[in-house]
Image (tube, rainbow, N blue to C red):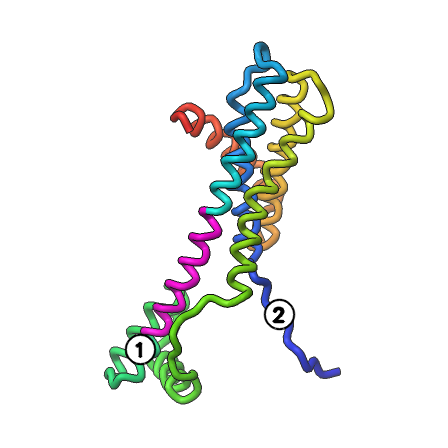
């Protein structure tokens, strides 16, 4: 049976989704890490939770804006490359422009003939350059990034909602954070074909070390 409709490309790829969760999680972990198991009470815990949520709201918004800026910049660059290809540059200059856009390994593997065929195809079939603009999907992606950063805070909050024992809640929140870091490493390894157990354990260790470093530096 012939497939008549291509699958729609996800707005955010797996790496973007997982790394945004990791970022939001690390930010929330730094706030939980500032609480003392021995001396912190409910008031301190409540203040910490409000601060963590406010921080991730701010960083989620900043990340969303940066995503839109990056998208617009990449489209502007691609537009300018196509315009230069059509402006009468030499074949050698055109191949060099295309090689700069490709991943390094792919550009190194392609010979001059293959690059020339790609250049000719772009000249023959690529649409005329249009002014770069941001569409609905771009804003959906930005909103998705905002949500991922913010929602990464809430699993760490759950232990504080389930018990009045602040020390127990802190330990529970740390365990949730470690589990989420492990799951993030597992998902990244599954996407790239790496060792899932090793990647999960490594990210949990590295994430904990990063949290300690951020707290030590006053973050």
Q: Which residue is mark 2?
A: 8
Image coordinates of residue 123 in percent, x first then y, are: 37, 86
Q: Is residue 183 left or right of residue 98?
A: right
- Magenta residues span 62-80
Quarter of the C terminus within the rendering: top left
Q: Quadrant of residue 151?
A: top right
Q: Is residue 108 left or right of residue 46?
A: left
Is 210 included in the stretch rendered in magenta?
no
Is 66 included in the stretch rendered in magenta?
yes
Residue closest to the eye, 27 or 196: 27
Q: Secondary structure at mark 1?
A: helix
Residue closest to the eye, 138 or 26: 138
Query: In the image, what residue occupies the spot 57% across and 42% down?
Result: 150
Query: In the image, what residue occupies the spot 39% across and 78% down?
Result: 130
Q: Which mark is residue 95?
A: 1
Callout 1 crowding tier (Cα within 10 Å): few <14, some 14–19, many ≥20? many
Q: Which mark is residue 192?
A: none
Query: In the image, what residue occupies the spot 61% across and 52% down?
Result: 190
């Amino acid at each position: 049976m012939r497939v008549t409709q291509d699958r729609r490309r996800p707005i955010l790829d797996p790496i973007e989704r997982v790394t945004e969760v990791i970022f939001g999680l690390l930010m929330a972990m730094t706030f939980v890490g500032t609480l003392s198991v021995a001396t912190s009470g409910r008031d301190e815990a409540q203040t910490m939770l409000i601060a963590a949520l406010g921080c991730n709201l701010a960083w989620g918004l900043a990340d969303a804006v940066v995503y839109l800026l990056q998208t617009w910049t990449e489209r502007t660059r691609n537009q300018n490359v196509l315009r230069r290809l059509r402006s009468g540059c030499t074949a050698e200059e055109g191949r060099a422009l295309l090689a700069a856009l490709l991943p390094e390994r792919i550009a190194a593997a392609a010979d001059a003939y293959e690059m020339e065929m790609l250049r000719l195809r772009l000249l023959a079939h690529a649409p005329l350059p249009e002014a770069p603009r941001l569409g609905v999907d771009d804003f959906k992606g930005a909103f998705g990034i905002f949500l991922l950063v913010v929602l990464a805070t809430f699993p760490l909050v759950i232990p504080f909602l389930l018990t009045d024992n602040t020390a127990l809640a802190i330990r529970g929140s740390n365990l949730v954070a470690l589990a989420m870091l492990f799951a993030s490493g597992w998902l990244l390894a599954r996407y790239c074909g790496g060792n899932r157990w090793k990647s999960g354990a490594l990210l949990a260790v590295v994430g904990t070390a990063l949290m300690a470093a951020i707290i030590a530096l006053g973050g």
